[in-house]
Amino acid sequence: MSTDFKATKAMFDLPEGLIYLDGNSLGPLPKTVAPRVAQTITAEWGQMLIRAWNEAKWMEMPLRVGDRIARLVGAEPGSVVMGDTLSIKVWQALASALEMVPGRGVILSDNGNFPSDLYIAQGLTGMLGADYSLRVVDPEAVFDAIDETVAVVMITETDYRTGRRHDMAALARKAHEKGALLVWDLAHSAGAFPVHLARDGADFAVGCTYKYLNSGPGGPAFIYVAPRHQERALPALSGWMGHAAPFAFDLDYRPATGVERMRVGTPPILALAALDAALDVWDNVDMEDLRRVSLDLQDAFIAGVSANCPDLALANPPEREARSSQVSFAHPEGYAIMQALIAHGVIGDFRAPDIMRFGFTPLYIDLDDVAQAVAILTRIMRDRIWDRPEYRVRAKVT
Ligand SMILES: *Cc1c(COP(=O)(O)O)cnc(C)c1O
């Protein structure tokens, strides 16, 4: 049986007449989320009050919800836990991995990475002192740059601008051969296509949930620690929720067993409830189906735009397998074109200096949406509708 994407589309509350191609930045609202959060507020917080930590099992939520994500990213049960934001989880994974490779101080990453990951690595190495540094190379040079000086290879699988993907299994093999560990950022992978953390040898992985997993703005992030490392990895951010016995109130830190040691402080229950409800969308989704249909939608969009908008240059890899779930086109006036598109009911986004991004998930996008989006973009380009002052005004968030 293949996945019923008409059924998943019906699970989202999308504004009438809008084509939403920006789930790669902020996933849309699943219908189950608002009632579930309302219930958590009124029935659990409102009525149970402090008892809800036990009675509504709030305390178990970070691990229980983590297991639902584990299934989507090919992780072993009990190896993913929720909490904090992605930037913080990057810090935690990096610090934890560095500590496990004594005598080496280099974090290797690439200049196609999302800046926050690089900033976090800069902050961490700066704090650790002169023996630690961040080495940044071109994405194509990462494999060859993994040598015996590298402690941790920190790679975001998918380039946030072009959707180009790294071969994570090959990087993991090379890292392990050279005695390094791999931290894998899944921000643009989890929920976008099949991921196989266990099969492909990840040591640590991190990701956010407000993009492809539709948990809402600022939804909690996740961290994965391979089972073989779980009793050795120290959490770096050693908060009481990662303690072996938080309610013993010991004065000395002792890490919990398993991945729960990566918990830091009190979990954001309302945000976790939103995420938990949003994950219902995935219950009957086969990730291989999702991948195949996502690529079909992309192919249709690329073919339509290439045939009708000669001024737009394809900025993602043309081959299907090398792509993620987004399509990018470059144009010097990309910002204004995207503003015109948004004003005409097609929402994508823009990344400096000249990239327009369009996300294609079959969860709520179908071929009719693609055809309409192509038609609207074609009109905007042909009639130069974008060439108006109001479309050039830069907002704070692009
Ligand atoms: C979206 C994204 C982030 C954002 O981190 P937050 O802490 O959630 O703001 C970080 N890294 C990558 C690779 C991303 O794509």
Image (cartoon, helix red, strand yellow):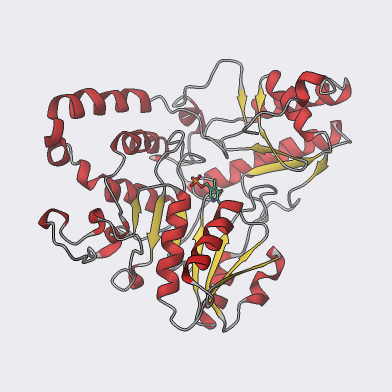
Q: Position of residue 18 (x, y in %)?
A: 61, 20
Please give the name of the residue rendered at 57% of the width and 47% of the height, measured from the top-left corner: 291
Residue appearing at x 71%, y 26% in the figure: 373
Seen in the picture, residue 396 relative to 319 is either above or below; the reply is above
Left-right relation of 77 to 292: left
Whether residue 334 is visible, yes or no, is: yes
Count every numbered label the image shows and give the total: 0
What residue is drawn where x is 31% and y is 58%? 77
Q: Where in the figure is residue 385, as x and y percent of width and height? A: 83, 20
Where is 94 relative to 103, above or below? above
Say above or below: 88 vs 27.
below
Viewer-nearest residue: 22 or 31: 22
Q: Nearer the viewer, residue 132 or 176?
A: 132
For residue 32, say whether it is visible: no
Q: Locate residue 330 relative to residue 66 in the image: left or right.
A: right
Answer with left or right where residue 177 lies relative to residue 274.
right
Residue 93 percent across, percent down from the top left: 43, 62
Considering the image in quadrants, where does the C terminus appear? top right
| Residue 42 quadrant | top left
Depth check, front residue: 165 or 147: 147
Q: Residue furthest top?
A: 16
**Residue 288, above or below 76:** above
Q: Position of residue 113 (x, y in %)?
A: 62, 56
Residue drawn at x 65%, y 70% as measured from the top left: 142
Left or right, 164 with respect to 157, comes to right
